[in-house]
Image (spheres, rainbow, N blue to C red):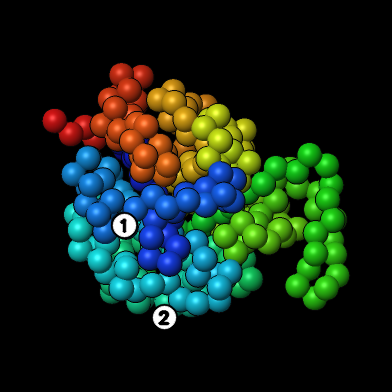
Amino acid sequence: MLTTRVIPCLDVDQGRVVKGVSFVDIRDAGDPAELARFYDSEGADELVFLDITASSDARNTMVDVVERVSAEVFIPLTVGGGIRSREDMRRMLEAGAEKVSVNSAALANPMLIEECAEEFGSQCVVLAIDAKRIEKPAMVERSDGGSDIAEALWQVYTHGGRRATAVDVIKWARMGAELGAGELLVTSMDADGQKTGYDCDLLRTISSQVSIPLIASGGAGTLDHFVNAVTDGGADAVLAASLFHYGELRIQDVKSHMAESGLPMRLIH
């Protein structure tokens, strides 16, 4: 049985790790290389680095920062933000990433997933999805100035959560898996930073539709929340940021609690 992974996330803006609540009210959380070194020593299973303004600012991911982070860790590193082509993905892999996350560009051009999977292997391609719950059908603007009615229960957001789309999260997750993504990183924008628990309804719905691993993101606040994401939501890995950055919980405590709850974990002694 595969072990459940615990993954800290470094949301990076202008070379600094930051964290907000529901993608707003951003505050500084430290130097990415220093935090990467700390999490490596803490027993993190993997590390995710997301340049959260690369897409919205229409620029590439900061390679120098990725290189500094990768030099500090001996665990798998996933890098995302501003990845628009196979060349961008190659650049990140050469900078030290083991996996590369695509989001906004993949939604604009779904074949990017297939192209990258064919060239680098599905195991290198992570499809990141920022999901927001819709209480009722909503009008969303299109890039051509028109509008559509979004009927999905969850709709996809792009550009660091700044732009709504009319795309159904569940359909997009299924399509991403079919195109060759090796893993899904699903963030609930509603739960992000709220510390009220992962959106297990969202996770459960997606995990029942795809066969590739699912990383749960957004909402962790207690030790039980990590367990629930796996046992109730069907996640294969749990990701958190502010809880770890500000010392509210330690990775080893999370892993010990999950192990005590019967989940297979890689424990550090």
The local secondary structure at tag 2 comes to: helix
Left or right: 133 in relation to 56: right
Residue 109: image location, x then y, percent: 61, 73
Left or right: 80 in relation to 110: left
Residue furthest to the bottom in view is: 87
Camera-side residue of 209 and 20: 20
Which residue matches tag 1? 31
N-terminal label among 1 and 2 = 1
The reply to whether residue 222 is visible in this rendering is yes
Tag 1 and tag 2, C-beta contact below 8 Å: no
Question: Which kind of residue does numbered mark 1 sit on?
Answer: Asp
Camera-side residue of 209 and 262: 262
Left or right: 228 in relation to 155: left
Residue 53: image location, x then y, percent: 52, 66
Left or right: 261 in relation to 128: left
Marks counted in the figure total 2
Q: In the rendered image, which quarter contains the C terminus?
A: top left
Tell me if mark 2 has few (under 14), some (14-19) or many (20+) residues whose alpha carbon lies within 10 angstroms of its own. few
Question: Which kind of residue does numbered mark 2 sit on?
Answer: Glu
Residue furthest to the left in view is: 269
Could you tell me which residue is drawn at 72 percent across and 60 percent down?
Answer: 165
The local secondary structure at tag 1 comes to: loop
Could you tell me which residue is drawn at 40 percent across and 25 percent down?
Answer: 223
Residue 138: image location, x then y, percent: 83, 50
Could you tell me which residue is drawn at 44 percent across and 26 percent down?
Answer: 222
Tell me if mark 1 has few (under 14), some (14-19) or many (20+) residues whose alpha carbon lies within 10 angstroms of its own. some
Which residue matches tag 2? 87
Camera-side residue of 243 and 255: 243
Q: In the rendered image, which quarter contains the N terminus?
A: top left
How far, Cα to Cα, is label 1 from label 2? 27 Å
